[in-house]
Amino acid sequence: MNTLDIERLLKIGIELSANADSDSLMREIVDVAMDLTNCDGGTLYILENDVLTFHIMVTLSLGIDRGGHGQTIELPPVALKPTNVCARAALDKALINVADVYEDQRFDFSGPRRYDQMTGYRTKSMLVIPMLDDKGDAIGVLQLLNAKDQNGETIAFAQDYEHVIQSLASQAAIRLTNLNYSREITRLLESMVQVLSTAIDARSPYNANHTRNMAGYGKRFLTWLRETNSEHAMTPQEEREFLMAVWLHDVGKLGIALSIMDKSCRIEGFEDAIRQRFLLIELLSEVEWLKGRCTKEAYEKTREDLKEALEAIGNANKAGFLPDDLLQKIEEIASREYVDRDGEVKHWLTNSERETLSIRKGTLTAAERSIMESHVVLTKKMLERISFSKEYSHVTRWASNHHELLDGSGYPQHLTAADLSFQERLLTILDVFDALTANDRPYKKAMPREKALGILRSMASEGKVDGDILELFYQSNAWTEGKE
Ligand SMILES: [Fe+2]
Ligand SMILES: [Fe+2]
């Protein structure tokens, strides 16, 4: 081995340890080993479930180049039988050098012979190297075919290269194992986050699939961005980071009381208090009539008014949005008076009942709304305690800003367009879209998706959400399907 070879090897070692993609790493190791030994073919198998699976297959003289770009090779895997040379190398964890497969009696070479008959190829020399990880376990096998001399004649693999190729294969094996570990850790983290978010969503029947739906819309949209080569297309890791923020955006709801989250009407159990009072007013009016202090018509009018008032209160109590006429009606009812048994003049509704029934939108009072809105502050506090790796460094920020709007009217920080990234703007759109279309919110019915997009468009024209991202989302059709 000359100085040039050694320099190349050092360079290859650095490249191998920098490669973060398993497929291209496997491809690189085959290319390097073939180049170094000047051979015609290379096959890389990975040991999975006690069989050797084809991952890369190259034969230069036949123009064969398969695997290595994410695609699978449709060939049956090799069973771990000691008569098979590749299986034997994996089992013995030792390199095997065969000068001519047609003359070697140690192994069953019927496979290469059949292959030669089919293709007209002549398999001769073979170097089979187990890929050993840091524990010395075989994770795969590298098989090299037909080494060439300077004139292109097939020769046996030189023993000089055995040691170098073996250490190269093991270096690649360790790198592959590490990549696997980190993939497994990521998968573990993602699945734990999904279980946690699903459990949080499940606390409230009104919010049961919110996060999962958003992750579904988000995932389909990101795939579309990638497939259409959009300027906003993300790398697979950036996509994972964004989806992690989606899964965690409402984690702060864990700290919000269910009585607020699930509040389905403005005054819970209002009937008990108001109905009792109205009954009393009716009885008092009846007494007045019986004592001759008012006419029968006046008593009957009061009875009718009470019935009508109770119905209006019932409607206002459940309304998603309180229309003007109903609001006026509540004001009118609240201003009516009666004289109680102690002779004290009182209103039909207490001040707090009037205020609560007059909430324009939703079912929460101002105080309850501010508790509900604090879930994003809690999301931030909780996520700040998690030590995310560099690849997930934006998760806390993106997740905590999902209620911010471009014109500063969002919460909790009232950020504006200049502060909000593509990911934050997208997360807000997904959140509003699912909140509008969900059929499981306490204070309103499900809205058709087209109508929800219409509302988002009017929010865009008011400068609240990003109109360009919204149009991309519309074009992507990611919103047409339901769950992930
Ligand atoms: Fe939220
Ligand atoms: Fe949300």
Image (tube, rainbow, N blue to C red):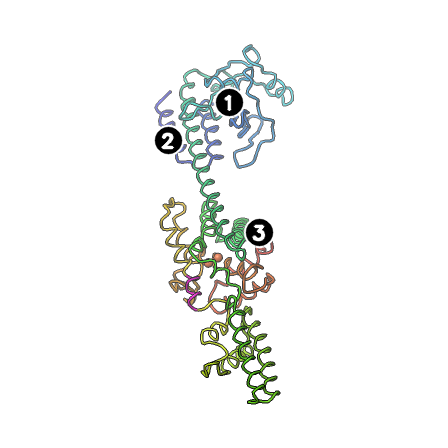
- Residue 92 vs 256, above or below: the answer is above
Residue interval drawn in magenta = 366-373
Q: Which numbered circle lies on residue 401?
A: none
> Closer to the camera, 86 or 337?
337
Amino acid bearing label 3? Lys
Q: Is residue 318 above or below residue 137?
A: below
Can residue 71 be seen by looking at this rendering?
Answer: yes
Q: Secondary structure at mark 3?
A: loop
Q: Are the residues at dot 1 and dot 2 in contact (C-beta closer than 8 Å)?
A: no
- Mark pair 1, 2: CA separation: 22 Å
**Residue 293 or residue 353, whichever sits in front:** 293
Mark 3, residues whose alpha carbon is within 10 Å: few (<14), some, or many (≥20)?
some
Residue reaching furthest to the right: 118
Q: Earlier in the sequence, mark 3 or mark 1?
A: 1
Could you say which disc has been placed on residue 483 in the image? 3
Query: What type of secondary structure mainly makes up the magenta span?
Result: helix
Residue position marked by numbered label 2 in the rendering: 11
Q: Nearer the viewer, mark 3 or mark 2?
A: 3
Any magenta on residue 447?
A: no
Q: Mark 1: which amino acid?
A: Gln
Q: Which residue is mark 1?
A: 143
Q: Residue at x 42, y 19 (%)?
A: 161
**Image height of 363 relative to 69, above or below:** below
Decide: marks 3, 2 in contact (CB < 8 A)? no
Q: Position of residue 289 (x, y in %)?
A: 58, 86
